[in-house]
Image (spheres, grey):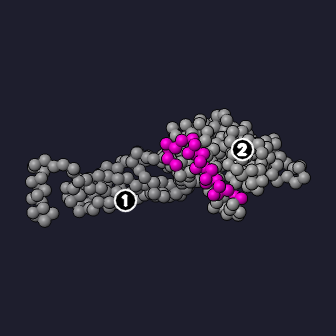
Amino acid sequence: MDYYEKLGLTKSASAGEIKKAYRKLALKYHPDKNNGDKAAEQKFKEISEAYAVLSDAEKKQQYDTYGSTDFHRRYSQEDIFSNFDINDILNQFGFGGAAGQSAGFRSGSMGGGGMGGGASFFSSMFNQPGGGGGCGGGSCRQPAKGPDMSYQLGVTLDEVMNGARKAISLRKNGSTQNVTVTVPKGIEAGKRLRLKGKGGVSPQGGQPGDLYLKVEIEPHAFFVRDGDDLIMEKKISFSDAVLGTSVQVKTLEGKKFSVKVPGGIQSDAKLRIPGHGLPRGPHGKRGDIYVRIGVQVPAELNEEQKKVIESLKEAGL
């Protein structure tokens, strides 16, 4: 999520411009003005998250320094909303207590455990269980579960190929926690890995929430993933494209192939190496490698090369 884009701003925006942009969008998308509109609710959630980061000098500096992907690896959603008093913000913008209550807000900051006093806007809108929200008559049989937390998990193509156990450090509840996660073979971008009981602490002493790690495939030096297939680009000269040649390909596991390029090949044509792509799940067969051919056109020619090209042109090539 690009927080500046969500607020319609550029990275050079001042604190006053950030506050003004959020107020304008909050007035537009506030749940009180969009009763039952899930799209508006989602939009309000996104702009509130953006403002929670960009209005905090320390978090803004981290976001500006590391970018969205690395920022979300360092900060959970609970950390993002720590010390962010949504009621105070809404009161500043003229929503008042009644509007906040109807939108699901309750008094108390988002500091400490991140949920403040009682169920909050972030309990319902962010699908996080709050404290005491489902208790009738002020009592519960069991304390409410702590909030679930989400992070992004970078995974390399080698780890997709072989599976992996990754030890990662996460910021949780304002401190650093080390956790280990098993990455299965063939995992796809966007999949979520769940670590039960590794989420936020329950304010009432109940079970902790769960930790969800959203998989993001890291860029590779040579390959681009396309489902279970891997695509690599090889550049050849014009003469090799006309006459034919061969190119050398190294797979993820280090196997080397000499791939024949037929004469007359066209730019962007693909040559297939079957069965050397990524696995289709933990136990599935592997996809293929495709070598995409690009024909290099020299930016400059010396006099001898120009004469050769001119003679080819005269010959109809």
Q: Which residue corresponds to the image point at 32% horizontal and 61% vertical from the top-left? A: 269
With respect to residue 67, does 247 lie above or below?
below
Q: Which residue corresponds to the image point at 59% horizontal and 36% vertical from the top-left? A: 57
Residue 239 spot, x, y in % from top left: 19, 55
Please, what is the dominant secondary structure of the magenta stretch? helix
Query: Which corner quadrant of the image does residue 72 belong to?
Result: top right
How many numbered circles are shown? 2
Q: Which residue corresponds to the image point at 67% horizontal and 35% vertical from the top-left? A: 174
With respect to residue 202, does 238 lie above or below?
below
Label placed on residue 272? 1
Residue 6 spot, x, y in % from top left: 56, 52
With respect to residue 116, does 95 lie above or below?
below
Q: Quadrant of the C terminus?
A: bottom left
* Residue that badge 2 annotates: 88
Range of residues picked out in magenta: 9-32
Position of residue 201 in the picture relative to residue 268 (left or right): right
Q: Residue furthest front?
A: 94
Spatial separation of the CA atoms under disc 1 and disc 2: 60 Å
Amino acid on which disc 2 is placed: Asp
- For label 1, the crowd category at 10 Å Cα-Cα, with few meaning under 14, some 14 to 19 and many 20 or more, is some
Label 1 sits on a secondary structure element that is: strand
Amino acid on which disc 1 is placed: Arg
